[in-house]
Amino acid sequence: MVVKRLIDGRFQFIRVVSTKAYTKTYLMTDHGSLTKNKCIVKHLQLPAHNTITLKFLNDLLAKRVSLLKRMGEHDAIAKNLSTVQEGQDFYWVRDYVPGHSLLTELAEQKPKTEAEVQSFLTESLSILDIIQRHGIAHQNLHPNNLIRHRDRGHLILVDFGLIQDTGTPEPAPATNGTSGVPNAESAYVPQAKHRQYTRFAADHFALGMIAVQMATGLSNEAIPRLSQDDFLAQVKLQLDECSLLSNALKEILLRMVSPQPEAQFRQAKDILVALPAPEVVLASPAVASAAQPLPQENGAMEPESPRFAKRSG
């Protein structure tokens, strides 16, 4: 049915990106834009047949989408274009982001340097800081949902969790056509039974585990799962044996993934503040005198979100 008609009289099917239990993801053409841009359409088939229950689920989804729209537009967050509801079918449309997901980079299984891991943390936590200021958690954060823009090179956050609010776990979709899906028990998203993670802490956990995988060069299958009794000890062992990170950065990663509430960071900005200062390589006097910093024409950026400013207009 989808391939034979326009969704909302506007979005035309190109191909299926992924198919899951309650969700399907499509690549479509947006005929509502002058340039007929590509877009990603997430089709949720709500697991309810009772009219009252269906209305309740629709209201939850509408509230979640409304909250995301109030956040505004940012260069590091994929733009939400539209939402459409047809009976039990709910469509959520966002910009197509040209580029590749972090899953592609992790698949290289090459350990990253401390500077590279810290750069990732600074960039990704700055994005979380933006959404947390609006009281929003991603709730479905894993490598497929961080896209490195093909032309600009920076990370863009996509596909916020929607159906967690309905009590139905949401499997990780392929993003922008990227293949590869995390295991049945995700290494990045704590299951509902792990209630010691707040909404924000669950997002911190995801970035922490991605950083562990970056630092060690291990495959998705090799990194520990939260269900293991010795989960935190296994993470520490892998960091000690397979990475070259400093003790200070290891400690931060262990706190980010810790199941102990007293060890967890409350907000992304707290982690940004805690990150160790990057190593400074001293240049020779001749080089130092030649490399004068450029003036900041518009004043300093906010230290908590150094790379991403809200779009104007």
Image (cartoon, grey):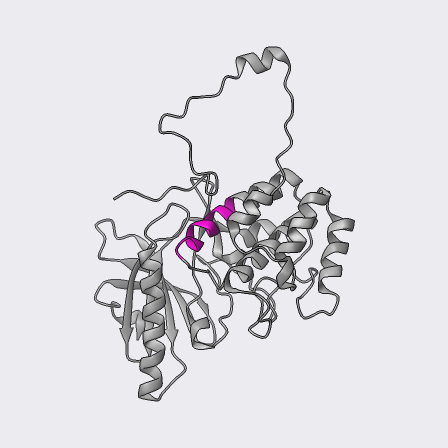
Residue 109's spot in the image, x, y percent?
Answer: 66, 50
What is the residue that sits farthest to the top in this orientation? 286
Q: Is residue 311 visible?
A: yes
All told, the count of numbered labels is 0
What is the residue that sits farthest to the front in this orientation? 262
Horizontal side of residue 240 vs 281, given as left or right: right
Asked whether 223 or 4 is in front, the reply is 223
Q: Is residue 169 magenta?
A: no
Q: Residue at 32% of width from left, 75% of height from top? A: 59
Horizontal side of residue 285 vs 86, given as left or right: right
Q: Main secondary structure of the magenta part?
A: helix
Question: Quarter holding the C terminus?
Answer: top left
Q: Is residue 125 magenta?
A: yes
Asked whether 217 or 209 is in front, the reply is 209
Horizontal side of residue 72 vs 77, given as left or right: left
Residue 76's spot in the image, x, y percent?
Answer: 42, 47
Residue 153's spot in the image, x, y percent?
Answer: 47, 40
Q: Is residue 109 visible?
A: no
Question: Quarter holding the N terminus?
Answer: bottom left
Asked whether 82 or 123 is in front, the reply is 123
> In the image, which residues are magenta?
123-134
Residue 299's spot in the image, x, y percent?
Answer: 38, 29
Asked whether 165 or 21 is in front, the reply is 165
Q: Residue at 57% of width from left, 71% of height from top? A: 195
Q: Is residue 81 above or below residue 57?
A: above
Q: Is residue 41 above or below residue 152?
A: below
Choose top left, top right, bottom left or bottom right for residue 47: bottom left
